[in-house]
Image (cartoon, grey):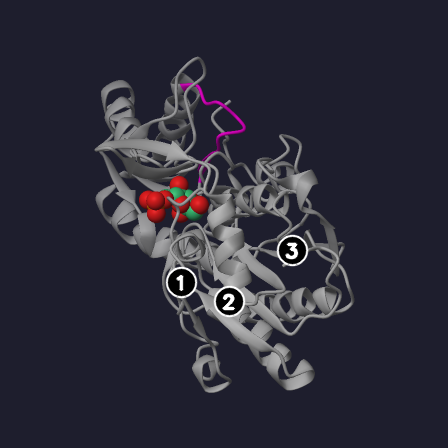
């Protein structure tokens, strides 16, 4: 699988990192385009980079990818623990983190892979960027519910996650107003507040807390108490899992050994519920949405985006481009070099237009 090879006869495809609605739609688009239009062999690599490291792969036929457009998850399996640069290997009874990129190259060559379509987020793209150095050829497709990949204005999976979170926010309104409570809905997003911002605005949240704007407890308590005094005896707070108090730290739920990013956030809603109850003397409840945001059938938007991304990725490879990430900018598809985005994340600008619009309709951002 050397860079000099021009003709592509066999492509590999893998899904890395957390699962996300729309993965199967990309697998389908890549595979169908490859088989229909170019008569290529398509090899599905199982469980992300793990399958490449352990040589677990299977050929995908047209039928294998039929009827998967609407399915959540990934038919190939995924892993957010396998980093080819730091893979745990047990030698003489001791576990060491080893660079196993040569194994990946060897396995790819044995399977005859001329290029690999890697569907994933920042960890997967960082893995691809490191494997490119061995001579492997890649085309990245941007996936993540967090919407935090640089270079692209949108990733597939985000829209579905926002719809799920919005639906949950809509539903907690009932309990909030009936019981005169502060309901706090915690959404995912890691270090970026995209899901919280969009779902918070769509669900008409009174307070939206995102990692990019540290909050002050006094500001939130004054805001919900004032609402109470004005007769609005309930409030809805949407909080991103990465939000933190000014001068405080993000709430870490657990650390996952051998993951490229071992930190797992979660629990800020519980802390806020406790703090607001103590200070504002209003009854609070926390709802942590967690992985329901990653599940279910992809929205129509994500299905179409995933189909366009998958088709474009394959067309780009066939046109001789590689080691790039498919992106969407100003509504148009394009690519950027993988090396320019690997290891970086895209957070919400503090002056984002949607923040300004939300402030204008009276939303508090806790600052
Ligand atoms: O990156 C997607 C994501 O769902 C984040 O929003 C969340 O912080 C993380 O993955 C959770 O990871 P895991 O599935 O390993 O708990």
State whether residue 346 is above or below residue 274: below
Q: Tell me the element at label 1.
A: loop
Identify the magenta region.
206-216
Proximity of marks 2 and 3: CB atoms separated by less than 8 Å: no
Q: Nearer the viewer, residue 317 or 133?
A: 133
Magenta-colored stretch includes residue 211: yes
- Which residue in the rendered view is the most extreme toward the top? 247
Answer few, some or many: residues within 10 Å of disc 1's Cα (few below 14, many 20 plus, some between 14 and 19).
many
Q: Tell me the element at label 2.
A: loop
Magenta-colored stretch includes residue 12: no
Residue drawn where x is 61% and y is 66% of the image: 305
Proximity of marks 2 and 1: CB atoms separated by less than 8 Å: no
Q: Which mark is residue 244?
A: none
Q: Which mark is residue 111?
A: 2
Question: Residue 335, how many percent across, how many down?
Answer: 73, 54
Question: Residue 69, how many percent across, how many down?
Answer: 48, 76
Reading the chain from its start, which is encountered first: label 2 or label 3? 2
Left or right: 280, with 247 as reference point: left
Give the quarter of the image for residue 269. top left
Q: Nearer the viewer, residue 37 or 302?
A: 37
Q: Which residue is mark 3?
A: 137
Question: Residue 193, how many percent across, how many down?
Answer: 51, 38
Closer to the observer: label 1 or label 3?
A: 3
Residue drawn where x is 51% and y is 55% of the image: 106
Q: Which residue is mark 1?
A: 46
Answer few, some or many: residues within 10 Å of disc 3's Cα (few below 14, many 20 plus, some between 14 and 19).
many
């Amino acid at each position: 699988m050397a860079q000099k090879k021009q003709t592509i006869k066999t492509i590999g495809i893998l899904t890395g990192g957390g699962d996300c609605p729309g993965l199967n739609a990309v697998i389908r688009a890549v595979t169908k385009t490859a088989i229909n239009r170019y008569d290529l062999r398509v090899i599905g690599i199982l469980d992300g980079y793990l399958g490449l490291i352990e040589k677990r792969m299977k050929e995908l036929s047209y039928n294998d990818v039929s009827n998967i457009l609407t399915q959540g998850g990934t038919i190939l399996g995924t892993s957010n623990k396998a980093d080819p640069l730091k893979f745990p290997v047990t030698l003489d009874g001791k576990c060491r983190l080893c660079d196993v990129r040569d194994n990946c190259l060897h396995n790819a060559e044995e399977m005859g892979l001329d290029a690999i379509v890697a569907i994933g987020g920042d960890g997967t793209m960082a893995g691809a960027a490191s494997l490119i150095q061995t001579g492997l050829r890649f085309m990245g497709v941007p996936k993540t519910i967090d919407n935090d990949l640089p270079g692209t204005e949108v990733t597939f999976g985000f829209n579905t996650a926002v719809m799920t979170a919005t639906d949950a926010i809509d539903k907690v309104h009932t309990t909030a107003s009936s019981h005169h409570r502060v309901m706090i809905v915690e959404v995912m997003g890691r270090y970026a507040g995209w899901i919280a911002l969009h779902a918070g605005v769509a669900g008409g949240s009174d307070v939206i807390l995102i990692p990019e704007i540290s909050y002050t407890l006094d500001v939130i308590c004054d805001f919900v108490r004032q609402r109470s005094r004005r007769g609005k005896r309930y409030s809805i707070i949407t909080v991103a899992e990465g939000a933190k108090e000014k001068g405080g730290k993000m709430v870490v739920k657990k650390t996952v050994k051998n993951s490229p990013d071992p930190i797992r956030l979660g629990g800020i809603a519980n802390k806020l519920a406790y703090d607001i109850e103590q200070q504002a003397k209003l009854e609070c409840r926390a709802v942590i949405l967690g992985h329901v945001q990653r599940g279910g059938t992809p929205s129509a938007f994500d299905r179409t985006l995933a189909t366009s991304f998958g088709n474009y990725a394959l067309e780009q490879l066939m046109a001789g481009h590689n080691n790039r990430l498919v992106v969407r900018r100003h509504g148009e598809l394009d690519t950027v070099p993988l090396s320019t985005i690997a290891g970086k994340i895209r957070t919400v600008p503090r002056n984002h237009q949607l923040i300004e619009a939300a402030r204008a309709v009276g939303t508090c951002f806790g600052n």
